[in-house]
Image (cartoon, rainbow, N blue to C red):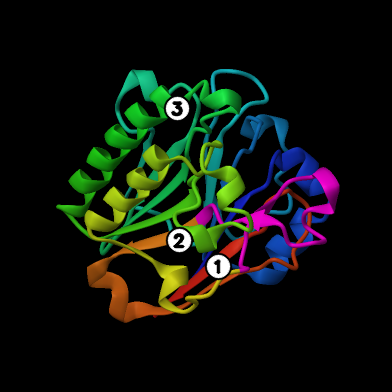
Amino acid sequence: MKFISWNVNGIRAAIKKGFCDFFDEIDADFFCIQETKARPEQVDLNWNTKHHSYWNSAEKAGYSGTSIFSKIEPKEVFYGIGINQHDKEGRVITLRFDDFYLVNVYTPNSQNELRRLEYRQSWDKAFLKYLKNLDKKRPVILCGDLNVAHSEIDLARPNANTKNPGFTNEEREGFDELVEANLIDTFREFEKGSGHYSWWSYRAKARERNVGWRIDYWCISKPLKNRLQSSTILDQIMGSDHCPVMMELK
């Protein structure tokens, strides 16, 4: 099974930049999108002929939002995490299948001057509890833009970013708790080195110089580890300030 996750930074903009060609070519069984910035009725979906699609849009127009395209019809679909405070921005979709849950998340950014760090910490705790409850029932496959570089090798300039959004101690500890809660960062099962990133600023030719951050992930519950075949960053794919990340399971 082939899984793709991509923060497209606006699905309508991405479609104009070749998104549909990549979608068809990669032919994923599950294609998860973050930061759709649109409602489904605002998007021309004529290119989607093989997949069931599920959308969770923010109350605020043109903001946040997630979607999943799945070749397999799930047994159930859940939108949000069941907490009104956290469910207004369209950040989570969960699909239930017979042997796993697929969770697509667009984690809140702490924003400039860490204006939203306190909210982010509240979100991390609530989302962790949500994942733990799912994991009690069946294994979890988690993907998305988690808006955190977990360790120093996950960004090009760790020393310069220790107090910046996405690399604060609080956010990194939030990822630590995901790992402690039975989840595996699949990319690190195959690649232990630095220099591998999934997001680059639009400024100063950051992508061209590979001055980036790895903040997009595929994580799986430990019981699924023996099914893990690959986990890669498709950094050659353009169309957003993020690139897609791919995982394959037996």
Q: Is residue 94 above or below residue 183?
A: above
As displayed, is residue 244 above or below residue 104? below
Disc 3, disc 2: CB below 8 Å? no
Residue occupying the point 70% across, 45% down: 45
Query: Are the residues at dot 2 and dot 1 in contact (C-beta closer than 8 Å)?
Result: yes
Q: Secondary structure at mark 3?
A: helix
**Is 169 on the left or on the right of 236, as rendered?**
left
In this picture, residue 247 sits left or right of residue 6: left
Q: Amino acid at mark 2?
A: Trp
Q: Quadrant of the C terminus?
A: bottom left
Q: Which residue is mark 2?
A: 218
> Pointer 3: residues within 10 angstroms few (<14), some, or many (20+)?
many
- Which numbered marker is on residue 117? 3
Whether residue 1 is visible? no
| Number of disc labels | 3
Q: Is-magenta flag for residue 138?
A: no
Mark closest to the chain's N terminus, 3 or 1: 3
Give percent across and percent down for residue 224.
Answer: 28, 71
Mark 3 belongs to which amino acid? Leu
Inspect the magenta stretch and tell me whether residue 215 lies in it.
yes
> In the drawing, does residue 15 fall left or right of residue 225?
right
The residue under label 1 is which amino acid type? Met
Q: Which residue sits at x=28%, y=42%?
A: 128
Residue 169 in view in this figure? yes
List the residue tagged with mark 1.
Answer: 246
Mark before the other along the chain sequence, 2 or 1:
2
SS at badge 2: strand
Magenta: main secondary structure: loop
Disc 2 packing (10 Å; few <14; some 14–19; many ≥20): many
Q: What is the crowding at mark 1: few (fewer than 14 residues within 10 Å), some, or many (at least 20)? A: many
The image shows residue 126 at horizontal and vertical percentages of 28, 33
In space, the residues marked 3 and 1 are separated at their CA atoms by 29 Å
